[in-house]
Every structure is written in structure tokens, then in C-alpha cells.
Amino acid sequence: MAQRISLTRYLVEQQRIDGLIPGQLRLLLEVVARACKGISQAVNKGALGGVLGSAGTENVQGEVQKKLDIIANEVLIEANEWGGHLAAMASEEMAGIHPVPNRYPQGEYLLLFDPLDGSSNIDVNVSIGTIFSVLKKPAGLAGVTEADFLQPGHAQVAAGYCVYGPQTTLVLTVGDGVAMFTLDREQGSFVLTQQNVRIPEDTREFAINMSNMRHWDAPVRRYIDECLAGKEGPRAKDFNMRWIASMVADVHRILTRGGIFMYPWDKREPDKPGKLRLMYEANPMSWIVEQAGGAATNGHQRILDVVPTGLHERVSVILGSKNEVERVTSYHG
Ligand code: P6P
């Protein structure tokens, strides 16, 4: 049997190769991975753990919070507060930033996360996940403010997600490609199961919520109409459709076999550029996709080049197989 490489060994050996994982960042990534193990345990308990259903509260987005949304958020906060690697955290579930309490040492990193993405799927036992993004705190001023977080996605130093599905799999990049680690529940550790992940540049599979078709802008409508026209249409090939309504699961499929994922602007809420959040959903997923040879735009520019103006701002997302993303983006031209 091939030698099993743990997450810890991978991080140590990668640091020797390209120096992209200094000690504090390695500690951060191992703490986040340990928190994801805890979240996976809570998710797996389901009804047996009394963790299903709504918490009866709303988050800053005005969305009903599931019990597991709050549990996952608390697990990530508690796991990361004491280590001395972070200056502050930001979460989809919290209105403002969460500075590391003064009783703990301050670090040089900023951690952003969607603690449990796709939580509408929790109660129906469909894959969900945690998405995280790591930035460096700007040098200089003591203390930390929300403005320190408002960096474009290309400034990330690490990004990843953990999908809680048939397997619990952690997917990670620090800028030298994408690696996947599967949780070995018997050992309680993440084991390297794939590295140098590559997304095929072409695909026959698109992911979009078709119920919104009448609200889409013309370029998106044109692209999907052409896919639906199949062999007889301008694409001269048939397409398949998937929509799990859990970004982590849809993106994981695309990393595994290719595809294009779209949550574009639509006219239901014309003042919002899209549904998905830039800082802790689109940016980490876009960097991972680009690191795997894919592309990610908002229809007009690379998502990683969008300059954020707010912690919870939204963005239109078109990501996945490079040639398809470029085609949709060209239609917006
Ligand atoms: P809809 C989950 O709530 C999420 O933020 C993403 O994970 C997912 O891709 C999208 O929203 C699903 O949205 O409108 O299809 O339910």
C-alpha cells in the first residue's frame, strides 16, 4: 500500500519545497482542519445529535440560521482564538469582525469563513461544507479593523474547503496547486489522497439553478440556451446539468471531473451583483479553481481582481472549466 501522508507531513514537506507555509500558517491550517473534523462529527450525528432544524435566529444576511450554522461557527471561533496565529476572524454568520481576545497572543493572519455552506441541505442529508480564506494582516498599525480584511482575492495566502459528504474531504491551496485530503475516521486524521488537481478545460456539464432562467441577463440566457440546444445547436454537443444547491459540493464535482458553475446576477434583486459572497465563498473557491487550471469571473473580470468594499458583499460567480468560463465571459463582452 502506498505510504500514507498526513496533512501535517504534507504541510511540513511543502514548506521545505517552496516556503509557502511558514510555521504560523501551518498551525492555522492544522487548527482549521481539526475544527472541520469536529464539524464533520456534529454533521454526521444529524437527528441523533439534536443538531437539525433552525436555531430560530437570523444571520447578518437576513437568512434563517440552522442550529449547525451556529455550532460550526462556534467551533471555528473557539479552535482559532488561542493559537497566536490570528489577528481576527470574519464569518458569514457574524455581522462584524471577531478580533482575537486580548487574553490571547495576536498573530499576523486573518481568517474568513462560511462555517457551513449549503445549510438548506442539512435537514435533507445532502452534502454541505465549510469554506475558508486566509489573508495576511496589513503591516503597521496596531489592532485590526474591518478595512484590513478588504483585500482582493489575489492577496490570499491560503484557501480551502471541507466537504461533508460520503467522505469528509479537505481541499487546500497555498498557491502551489490543489491538494485533497480524505478524513480517516479510524485514525482521526486527514490523509493526502490527491495532489496537483487539474480541471479539464472543456466540459459537457453545467451547474445553475434553472428556476431563475426568466430572471437572467441575456449573456447567461444565451449560453444556457446553446447548451440546451445540444448536438443540433451551435455547440454541436449535448450537455448534462447538475445543481446540488451546495456550492462546496458543486465545486468539488467540478474539481473532480470538470464543469461550469454559475450563480449570476439576476433581476430578482437588481441592486445585488449576485447571491454568493465575495470574501468567504467566491474568493477562496475562485483561487482553488484557478490553481487547478480553471477560471473564475463575475462575467466581466477575474473574481480574484475584484476590490472589495464590504465584508459581506456579494458577487456574480462563473467558475470551472477554463474554456467554458471564457466563452460565457466573452458573451458579456
Ligand atoms: P439556491 C447555499 O445557500 C448557497 O449559498 C450556495 O452554497 C449554493 O450554491 C446556493 O446558495 C444555492 O442557492 O438559490 O439555488 O438555493
Image (cartoon, rainbow, N blue to C red):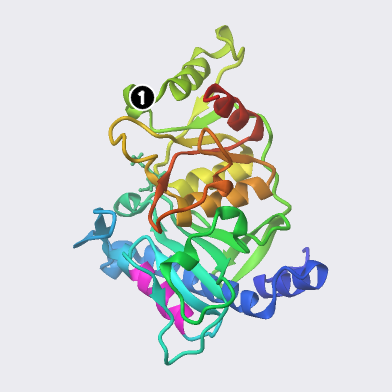
Quadrant for the N terminus, please: bottom right
Which residue is identified by label 1? 213
Residue 138: quarter of image: bottom right
Residue 193 left/right relative to 249: right
Q: In this view, does 157 lie above or below 302?
A: below
Quadrant for the C terminus, please: top right
Range of residues picked out in magenta? 71-81
- Prevalent SS, magenta region: helix
Q: At x 48% / y 86%, what residue is drawn? A: 82
Q: At x 77% / y 68%, what residue is drawn? A: 3
Would the CB of label 1 be found within 8 Å of ligand 1? Answer: no
Of 85 and 121, the residue lying toward us: 85
Q: Is residue 85 above or below residue 296?
A: below
Q: Which quadrant of the picture is home to ligand 1? A: top left
Of 140 and 205, the residue lying toward us: 140
Q: Is residue 226 above or below residue 137?
A: above
The percent position of residue 327, horizontal first and vertical second, equals 60, 25
Q: At x 44% / y 71%, what residue is drawn? A: 89
Examine the structure image and report whether residue 74 is included in the region drawn in magenta.
Answer: yes
- Where disc 1 sits, the SS reads helix
Residue 64: quarter of image: bottom left
Residue farthest along the left direction in this orientation? 56
Examine the structure image and report whether residue 280 is included in the region drawn in magenta.
Answer: no
Asked whether residue 96 appears in the rendered view, the answer is: yes
Amino acid type at circle 1 is Met
